[in-house]
Amino acid sequence: MISLLSGTVRMVSTDRLIVEVGGFGVSVLVNPQTAAKVTLGSQVQLFTSLVVREDSLTLFGFINDQSRSLFELVQTVSGIGPKVALSILGALTPEDLGRAIAQEDVGAIEKVPGIGRKGAQRLILELKGKLSDLSSVHPYKGHQPAWREQLTSALDSLGFSPKESDGAISQVISTLQADGTDAAQLDLSELLKLTLASGKSARG
C-alpha cells in the first residue's frame, strides 16, 4: 500500500498532479483545492490512498492525513465511491462535514456534486457519531510543515494518540526554540528521538 508520496511536482491540473519520485512520474488524483496549494517544480508531500479495481490502480492524494482518513471513511458508506468521496472533501472541510452529519444537515451535504439528497441522507445515517471529533475537539490547523506531518505520522504508527503527538511535538519545538534551534533544520530521525523522549516523560 502506498500511503505517503514525496517528490517534485511536474504537472498540475485541477484534478491531477504528476509527481516525480526517484525518476518516475506518479499520477495522483486530487481535488481542485489540493491542486491550488501546489506549484509546478515545487516539492510536495501527499498522504495517499490506493484504490484497486480489476482494470486499474488509482492513487488519490491529500495534503494531510486527516483528509486521507476521511476520504477512506466516507467510502464505507454504501453507494459512495472514490470520485464522489473526493468531491465531498473538495466541497466540505472535515469540520464542516462532521458538523453537517452531527446536525443532520442534509442540505449542506446534498450540494456536493454527484451525491444527491438520498446519498446525503445515507451518509448521515451511516457516519453519525463517527466524525464527532472532527467538528469540535481538534480544530483543523491547515497545512502543517512537511517535517511535522511526517513526525505526526511516525508517532501515530507507534501508538500515540493525536493529542499525545501534538503535545510531544510542541514540547520539543519549545525546547529547541529556547536553544535557538529551528526544528525544520534537524533530521526526522533526530526529531523522532527527541519527541519520543518527550512523549515518554509526558506519559509518566
Image (cartoon, rainbow, N blue to C red):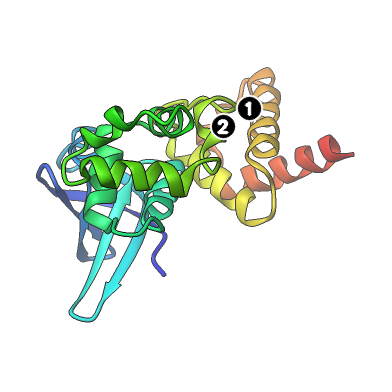
Q: Can residue 121 be seen from the camera position used here?
A: yes
Could you tell me which secondary element the residue under label 1 belongs to? Answer: helix
Where is residue 105? Give x, y as percent.
Answer: 37, 28
Q: Please identify the residue farthest to the right as the structure is shown.
A: 204
Q: Can residue 43 be seen from the camera position used here?
A: no
Answer with left or right where residue 48 lies relative to residue 91.
right
Amino acid tagged 1: Ile
Answer with left or right where residue 191 lies relative to residue 68.
right
Name the residue beneath numbered marker 1: 173
Q: Is residue 35 above or below residue 126?
A: above
- Whether tag 2 and tag 1 are in contact, CB under 8 A, the answer is yes
Please give the label number shown on residue 137: none
Instruction: Give whichever of discs 2 and 1 has the lower sequence position.
Output: 1
Instruction: Kindly report the distance in space between the C-alpha atoms of the residues bearing marks 2 and 1.
Output: 6 Å
Q: In this view, does 49 lie above or below 9?
A: below
Corner quadrant of residue 96: top left
Crowd tier of the residue under label 1, counting other residues whose Cα lies within 10 Å: few below 14, some 14–19, many 20 or above: some
Name the residue beneath numbered marker 2: 183
Task: State the residue in front, 122 or 187.
Answer: 122
Task: State the residue in front, 132 or 190.
Answer: 132
Tell me the residue at 29%/49% (across/down).
Answer: 85
